[in-house]
Image (cartoon, rainbow, N blue to C red):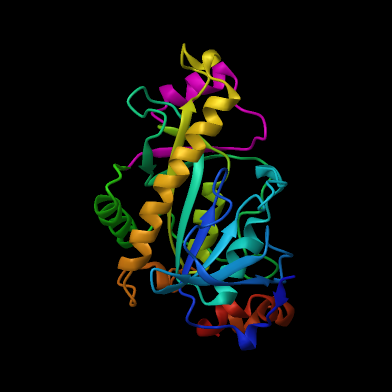
Amino acid sequence: MGCFWSLWNMSSDVKIGIIGGSGLYQMHGIEAVEEVSLDTPFGKPSDAYRIGTLEGRRVAFLARHHRNHTISPSELNFRANIYGFKQLGVEWILSASAVGSLKEELRPLDIVLPDQFFDRTTARASTFFGNGVVVHVSLADPVCPVLGDVVVAAARIAGVSVKRGGVYVCMEGPQFSTKAESNAYRSWGMDLIGMTNLQEAKLAREAELCYVTMALVTDYDCWHPAHDAVTVADVIDNLRKNSENAQKIIRAAVKMLPVERSCKCPDALHHAILTDLKKAPEETKRRLGLLLRKYL
């Protein structure tokens, strides 16, 4: 049974959040685990947060699709997931997710750190704001460069090869692409395709959290001539192997993460709030108090 924490008794020593995607439903090595179920102004997160100690640091782990993989990408409550991390006091989010490759050179079992996203979703809530508070954050560089540096260094220590950079096209799903779509994305210069990470990046920036994703390549998208020969068993095996390597990187990154943040992420809202908050609706300010309190 998860326990319910309210904002005023949250533990501020949990600075690192981990989001596990398909194939990564738990983080091995977390000690003294406590399950924490949260309510947020945006509803319930995907699962209870599993809070414990990993490599000497306090972390919060969340299974993006629930530990039983019962939530489709199009059904995910991205706002609740990210807001819940903010409630816990998290500052850094390490995300992992399964992706398809749109480039021959990005092979199954590769791990890629994309630095750009392209939005092809159609039906998702991607902002905390509205209802009388207008905010436009900068998303020119949607992942945290400092956290990216940490992950690259961590991969080197863990002995796992990663490729940094590339464009992740985020599709709505839950169906996969048609060949026409897949070939169009390739002609546009896209590198990877997935269904989850763009909303996380947008919302983490609005919540002034540092975010990076490890894209775990399971197979080539349907553009590839050999795609039809890939079985579900092949994909699951690749997921397992990639998840093992992702956990090695995460453990090394957790051990390395700095206490102070030197990037621009902690002040993302500083020049982004267009509304005079003194004139904003009181109910909206109350609902968004966790995000806006330092600007009120």
- 123 w.r.t. 48: above or below: above
Q: Is residue 51 left or right of residue 213?
A: right
Point out residue 150 in the picture as x, y percentages from the top left corner.
Answer: 30, 60
- 72 w.r.t. 183: above or below: below
Q: Is residue 274 visible?
A: no
Front residue of 99 and 286: 99
Point out residue 129 in the picture as x, y percentages from the top left corner.
Answer: 62, 65
Q: How many marks?
A: 0
**Considering the image in quadrants, where does the C terminus appear?**
bottom right
Outermost top residue: 225
Residue at 74% x, 79% y: name it.
283
Residue at 56% x, 71% y: name it.
51
- 52 w.r.t. 190: above or below: below
Q: Is residue 262 left or right of residue 31?
A: left
- 195 w.r.t. 55: above or below: above
Point out residue 74 in the picture as x, y percentages from the top left corner.
Answer: 68, 43
Point out residue 134 in the picture as x, y percentages from the top left corner.
Answer: 59, 66
**Considering the image in quadrants, where does the N terminus appear?**
bottom right
Q: Is residue 204 left or right of residue 250?
A: right
- Taking the magenta stretch, the answer to whether it contains residue 47 is no
Outermost bottom residue: 8
Front residue of 124 and 236: 236
Tell me which segment is drawn in magenta: 165-190
Q: Quadrant of residue 128?
A: bottom right
Q: Is residue 265 visible?
A: yes
